[in-house]
Structures are given as C-alpha cells and as structure tokens.
Amino acid sequence: MKNLYSSEPTENVSLQVEFSPVWEVILGIAGYTHTRLRHTFELDETWKVQQKSMPSALTKNLKAIEQTNFWYGLIMLQNQFSALSISDFLVCLSEISTTQFYEVLLPYSSRHDEPLRKAAAAQYENMGLFEEYAACFEGHDYLAAYTRHLSQYSFQEIGELFRQVLTGWHEWMSRQEEWDKWMQALAFEQKQSCLLDKEKPIEEMKRITDGVNYIPEPSIWTIKFIPHVSYRPWILEQRTPDTKLFFYPLKEESLLEPGVPPNALVRGHKALGDELRLKLLYELFKGPLSLQEMSRQFHISKTTLHHQLSILKSAKFIRVEKGIYSANLSQVRDFSGQLADYLGMDR
C-alpha cells in the first residue's frame, strides 16, 4: 500500500520570556510564605533581618497567604493579566468577572476533570463542587487544601487580600537598596533571552533553565520563562490548561559586585560543613537511596533527614526524582573549581 503524503505547516509551541515587577513581588510572597523550605532560600537571612521593619498589616496578610497557599492564585492571575505594574494588575483584578476569576484560580488537573473545574468556577457558591474538585488533588502538597480554601472565602475577600498583600509587599521590598538593581538585571535578562529558537523548544528549555529536562505535555501550546531573584536558588514549575510556566533563577553574575562570593559558593560550603550531610552525600555517591532507606541506615527521623537533604539539594549536590535521591556528580566535581575561580587561581 502506498501512502500519499503532502507536507502541511506544523504548529510549534510558543516560547516567551516574561518579566515585570509584578512577577518578582508574587514570587517574593510565595518564597516568604513557604515555611517548610524557606531556610533554603537565598533571601531568607535578609528577610529575617528586615522583618522588624515589616508593617503589621503586611505580616497579617502574609500569614493568611501562608495558611491558604493563595500565592498560587496570584501566579495564575498574573499569567492571565501579564500586568506590567502592580497598579495594572489591580485594574485587571477590578475588571475580571467572578466566574472568570475562579476559572483562572482553580488549578488544572486533567482533560477528564475540566468539566468539573469549569462547573465549579461557574457555580462558585457551590462548596460541594469545590470539595469534589479538591479530591482530584488528594496527595498533592498544597493544591487540595488550596482548592478548598477558595470555597471558604468570597470573591471580594480574596480580591481584597490580593490587593493588600501585593501593594504591601511591593512598598516594603521596593524600599530595600537592592530592589532597583534587581529590576534592571531582570529587565536586561528578558531583553537578552527574547531571541529564542522556536524550532528547538526542548534545547531552549535546557539552555535557559540550566538543564531542566522537559517532556512536552498534551494541550501545552505556550511555555513562559520568568526570571527571578526572590525565589533563588529554586526553579518553580506551574501550569494552566494551555501554558507551562518556568520560573528560573537569575544567574548570579548579573547581581554580584567584584570580590563578593557567589551565593552558590557560600551555599555549597554551608551544605558540606556538616558531618551528617557529608555522610549522606558519601552514601548517595555509592548509589541512589529512598528517604526510608536512609532513615533506617542512619537511625534518624524522616523529618530531620528531609531538612538535611533539602540543604544538599538547594546546593545542587543531590537530585530527587519520584522519592529517590541520587548524587549530582557533575556539580560536586565542579564545586572545587568554583572556589578556584573566585580566588583567581588557575584550575
């Protein structure tokens, strides 16, 4: 049998690099309220020092964001608005319909669950639909609880919380001496990265995110790359029904003054400056292990182990995939070279 084939134009995924101060504000809020991992954030010590100057109203609103995980909703709204300023965001927020508001905020689960998601958004006062949709995320770190919280607050209450926390965080952080420098560096990053090879989305993904392996997902037609400072050193991934979001840390050389050691170098030495963490890394060099296996081997609780492993992971000395930890050999090998580079020594 002969196959008659005529070439037709193919549709490629759209690649975008997007920056605005709104993204940096939202990621700062997301990082600050991520209490379980906040100790691994580069800005954690700065936040602790500056907490004394934080207005009490902002402290209260951040606590509400922490308890509800509504930072996720801020990300979903900014993805929808692409606002260039906080005032632009608030104008868009004031104009959005209630149904569209909930359709944007409700997380995507799957094509199978889309009718339920849209029904919950349309019938936003029906708590039963929200509860049913939340069940789609049972086992997820935060999306099940987040979805339930959406049904427990009114549209007006969530909108007012978003308005207050965005303006409060922006006013507080923009007074910090580094803020303008960050904005300039992030704007320059967007300008440098805007010329993307749309024919090679996977290769561009690895280049921009410094090695993330992305397997294309059905229905994803847009991939957005958002550079950040506030969520360093982590890469944050989120998605909507048709868009994948990658928040990647701005390269440190864009932020450093001469003679200042890179945070990666400081973070790496801190990670290695502990006997238990060195022993964990030693065992992982022998082969991958699960949290349970390490807990039995070291006679340490999983909670303590998770804390120690998160420090090694933030220094990129280890990886974790589907609950299995392994050593990042190339990062460990390169680390001594980073010290030599900083000190100006020949390798």
Image (cartoon, rainbow, N blue to C red):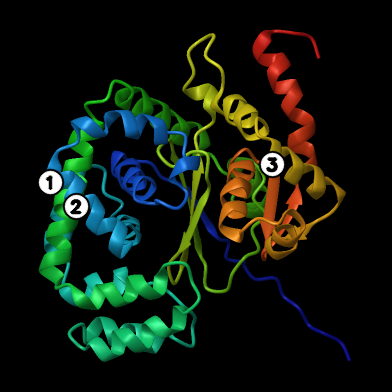
Crowd around label 1: few <14 · some 14–19 · many ≥20 (10 Å): few
Q: The C terminus is located in which quarter?
A: top right
Residue 152 in percent (x, y) is at 20, 76
Q: Are marks 1 and 2 in contact (CB under 8 Å)?
A: yes
The residue sitting at 63% across, 35% down in the picture is: 271
Q: Nearer the viewer, mark 2 or mark 3?
A: 3
Label located before the other in sequence (1 or 3)? 1
* Residue type, mark 3 in image: Leu
Identify residue for label 2: 61
Identify residue for label 3: 276
Crowd around label 2: few <14 · some 14–19 · many ≥20 (10 Å): some
Q: Residue furthest front?
A: 299
Q: Secondary structure at mark 2?
A: helix
* Residue type, mark 1 in image: Ala
User: Which label is found at residue 239?
Assistant: none
The answer to which quarter of the image holds residue 306 is bottom right
Residue 159 in percent (x, y) is at 15, 62
Q: Is residue 276 left or right of residue 188?
A: right
Nearer to us in this view, 285 or 211 = 285
User: Which label is found at residue 57?
Assistant: 1
Q: Is residue 89 left or right of residue 263?
A: left
Res 97 seen here: yes
Nearer to us in this view, 79 or 128 = 128
Res 199 seen here: no
Q: Nearer the viewer, mark 1 or mark 3?
A: 3
The residue sitting at 46% across, 69% down in the picture is: 242
In three-dimensional space, the C-alpha distance between marks 1 and 2, rounded to whole angstroms, equals: 6 Å
Q: Secondary structure at mark 1?
A: helix
In three-dimensional space, the C-alpha distance between marks 1 and 3, rounded to whole angstroms, equals: 40 Å
